[in-house]
Image (cartoon, grey):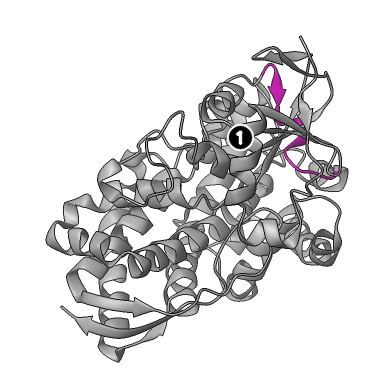
């Protein structure tokens, strides 16, 4: 058994955050685990290694999902930062309203809203894919679902972005966003059932707390996860859908010809451009991977995007091909901490893809604007033009 090789890269440097894939390839070539002293982390780089770690919470604890101690302290009491058996109980309350059966009645509403929004945007001949679609659509859906109104609804985007940003190391981005994330933490610590619309999922979580199905005081933590972990990544994913179809019109033509490919297309979007840059775990013991040892107590960085482009698992991984239908991609995680909101994210993304297929024959995209972000890799602006309505 030996120590992993090291690399002097800064995983959270601006240029890597904006476009990490060349760095991911170099790290994969070094080994399944690479020590990054500048970030004090052991990076997991290959598909099989990442999937195995995600499925082994006894060895890779979620007690340190963030890359600074302040955010890990702030996330105490959430299912994100817990291990079984506590995680099992909290996850059940979080997931109760996000099962396919529970979400089925919402599907028609999401489809209807997506069709109306995309039809309106297509009729304009051009629009900004981020502000007018990727942000507008999921924010409305989540606000109605959880029961957010007024000031909370108005702050959803900035709170959600800040909640993800502060998961990174204690760099300038994290420092600037902690006060904004603190607004979310404060609101979640004081929210009561009456603050949320009647019949909403948020009210249902408080009902679960009152019935003793979850610990007293945990309803606010669970609501925090719907907003903190669910909004920003969905915004990123919908933006990626439009950008990748614009870059690859031949793939969009396959969707317009056969809208039933929506699910396969979204799986490939998630594989090709993972919305999460890095996510943390803590090694609870010395862990051996292919003869390389991660020492007990080490901070681990899970690189979903590196695993999703691993040629050991996916043939021709740097090609965007919706016919691949990679149902086993890593972007929703795996194991007990697999994304609880993935069913809702799929409903929203599939609805947007079907709406684009129904109302747009072809379109072009301009240059993507990206701003470096510690955890969520997303597009900040994307002009869509020359829209030919279907």
Q: Is 271 a magenta residue? A: no
**Residue 345 or 225: which is nearer the viewer?**
345
Magenta region: which residues?
58-68
| Residue 362 in the image, given as x and y percentages of width and height | 23, 76
Specify whether residue 4 is in view: yes
Q: Secondary structure at mark 1?
A: helix
- Residue 253, picture quadrant: bottom left
* Residue assigned mark 1: 28
**Position of 358 compared to 65: left or right?**
left
**Residue 132 or 76: which is nearer the viewer?**
132
Dividing the image into 4 quarters, which one contains the C terminus?
bottom left
- Residue 24, picture quadrant: top right
Dividing the image into 4 quarters, which one contains the N terminus?
top right
Q: Is 59 a magenta residue? A: yes
Q: Is residue 283 above or below residue 128?
A: above
- Residue 358, picture quadrant: bottom left
Specify whether residue 112 is in view: no
Tell me the residue at 17%/64% (across/down).
256
| Residue 339 in the image, given as x and y percentages of width and height | 51, 40
**Residue 264 or 20: which is nearer the viewer?**
20
| Residue 37 in the image, given as x and y percentages of width and height | 86, 38
Tell me the residue at 64%/14% (across/down).
290
């Amino acid at each position: 058994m030996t120590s992993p090789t090291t690399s002097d890269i800064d995983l959270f440097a601006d240029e890597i955050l904006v476009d990490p894939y060349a760095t991911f390839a170099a790290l994969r070539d070094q080994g399944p685990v690479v020590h990054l002293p500048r970030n004090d982390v052991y990076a997991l780089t290959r598909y099989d290694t990442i999937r195995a770690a995600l499925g082994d919470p006894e060895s890779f604890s979620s007690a340190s999902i963030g890359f600074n101690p302040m955010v890990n302290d702030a996330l105490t009491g959430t299912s994100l930062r817990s291990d079984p058996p506590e995680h099992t109980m909290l996850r059940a309350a979080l997931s109760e309203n996000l099962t396919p059966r529970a979400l089925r009645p919402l599907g028609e509403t999401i489809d209807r809203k997506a069709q109306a929004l995309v039809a309106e945007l297509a009729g304009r001949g051009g629009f900004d894919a981020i502000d007018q679609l990727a942000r507008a659509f999921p924010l409305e859906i989540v606000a109605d679902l959880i029961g957010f109104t007024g000031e909370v609804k108005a702050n959803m985007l900035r709170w959600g972005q800040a909640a993800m940003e502060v998961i990174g190391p204690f760099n300038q981005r994290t420092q600037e966003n902690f006060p904004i994330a603190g607004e979310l933490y404060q609101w979640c610590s004081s929210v009561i059932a009456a603050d949320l619309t009647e019949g909403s999922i948020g009210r249902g979580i408080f009902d679960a707390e009152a019935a003793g199905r979850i610990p007293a005081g945990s309803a606010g933590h669970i609501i925090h996860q719907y907003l903190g972990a669910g909004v920003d990544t969905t915004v990123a994913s919908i933006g990626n859908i439009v950008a990748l179809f614009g870059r690859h019109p031949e793939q969009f033509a396959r969707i317009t010809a056969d809208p039933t490919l929506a699910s396969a297309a979204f799986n490939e979007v998630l594989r090709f451009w993972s919305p999460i840059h890095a996510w943390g775990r803590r090694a609870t013991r010395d862990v051996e991977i292919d003869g390389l040892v991660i020492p007990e107590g080490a901070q681990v960085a899970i690189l979903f995007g590196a695993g999703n482009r691993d040629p050991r698992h996916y043939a021709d991984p740097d090609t965007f091909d919706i016919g691949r239908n990679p149902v086993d991609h890593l972007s929703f995680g795996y194991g007990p901490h697999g994304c609880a909101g993935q069913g809702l994210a799929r409903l929203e993304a599939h609805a947007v893809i079907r709406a684009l297929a129904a109302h747009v024959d072809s379109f072009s995209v301009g240059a993507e604007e990206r701003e470096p972000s510690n955890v969520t890799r997303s597009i900040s602006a994307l002009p869509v033009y020359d829209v030919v309505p279907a």
